[in-house]
Image (tube, rainbow, N blue to C red):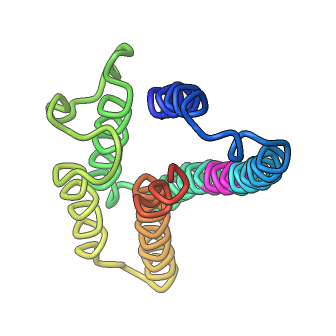
């Protein structure tokens, strides 16, 4: 874009020297100044709207990440309330969380004390089949819990509900990673 603007300015200076005097008059200059002023105003308006859109998307993504962390914490507490029956699910949630940390921040020191799959091939943004399989396994482990009494049945149902909320929050974070400036819009803006 910078090269295009510089080339256009150079071509304009070259072409101005070779134009007839009628095209270099004060009226033509005033008309061009008016058109350029309108274009600059339009570009400023569009860039302002673009900045507001990016800011709103950033705040939305930040909110979704915080909600995801909250849902994971609440889900962990529900699993703790379930007791020893939830140990396999809690172990897989620790593996899941460690894998997420290691895949999102590969340059940082990896989590210690928890085994997790190799994250070198996982994408830093978006969904990973390995991580999706871990979350699926957690859901299956909750589904096989057989409650002994009505209180346990209530706790198991709360775990299932919290698991669904974690999945919903996870999907929100994944969808936030896919949002971006549309290609047609950026081409029109550059034009």
The residue at the far bottom in this view is 150
Task: Residue 69 in the image: state x and y as whole percent.
Answer: 55, 49
The correct choice, above or below, for 121 with respect to 85 in the image is above
Residue shown at 35% from the left, 54% from the top: 84
Residue 54 among those drawn in magenta: yes
Residue shown at 51% from the left, 34% from the top: 8
The residues colored magenta run 50-60
Task: Residue 35 in the image: state x and y as whole percent.
Answer: 75, 54
Q: Nearer the viewer, residue 50 or 157?
A: 50
The correct choice, above or below, for 111 with respect to 79 in the image is above
In this image, 54 relative to 40: left or right?
A: left
Task: Residue 153 in the image: state x and y as whole percent.
Answer: 44, 82
Residue 73 among those drawn in magenta: no
In this image, 24 relative to 190: left or right?
A: right
Q: How many marks?
A: 0
Indicate the quadrant where residue 29 lies.
top right
Q: Which secondary structure class fits the magenta region best?
A: helix
Residue shown at 47% from the left, 28% from the top: 7
Q: Nearer the viewer, residue 63 or 42?
A: 42
Q: Nearer the viewer, residue 138 or 32?
A: 32
The residue at the far front in this view is 21
Indicate the quadrant where residue 85 lies.
bottom left
The correct choice, above or below, for 4 with respect to 63 in the image is above
Task: Residue 188 in the image: state x and y as whole percent.
Answer: 50, 60
The correct choice, above or below, for 108 with respect to 171 in the image is above
Residue shown at 61% from the left, 55% from the top: 57
């Amino acid at each position: 874009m910078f090269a295009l603007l510089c080339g256009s300015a150079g071509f304009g200076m070259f072409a101005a020297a070779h134009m007839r005097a009628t095209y270099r008059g004060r009226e033509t200059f005033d008309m061009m100044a008016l058109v350029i002023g309108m274009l600059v105003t339009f570009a400023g308006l569009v860039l302002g709207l673009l900045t507001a859109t990016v800011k709103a998307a950033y705040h939305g993504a930040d909110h979704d990440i915080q909600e995801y962390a909250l849902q994971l914490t609440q889900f962990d507490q529900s699993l703790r309330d379930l007791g020893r029956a939830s140990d396999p699910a809690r172990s897989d949630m620790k593996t899941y969380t460690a894998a997420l940390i290691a895949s999102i921040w590969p340059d940082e020191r990896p989590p210690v004390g928890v085994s997790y799959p190799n994250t070198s091939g996982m994408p830093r943004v978006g969904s990973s089949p390995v991580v999706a399989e871990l979350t699926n396994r957690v859901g299956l482990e909750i589904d096989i819990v057989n409650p002994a009494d009505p209180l346990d049945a209530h706790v198991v149902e709360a775990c299932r509900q919290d698991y669904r909320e974690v999945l919903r929050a996870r999907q929100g974070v994944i969808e936030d990673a896919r949002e971006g400036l549309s290609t047609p819009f950026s081409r029109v803006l550059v034009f």
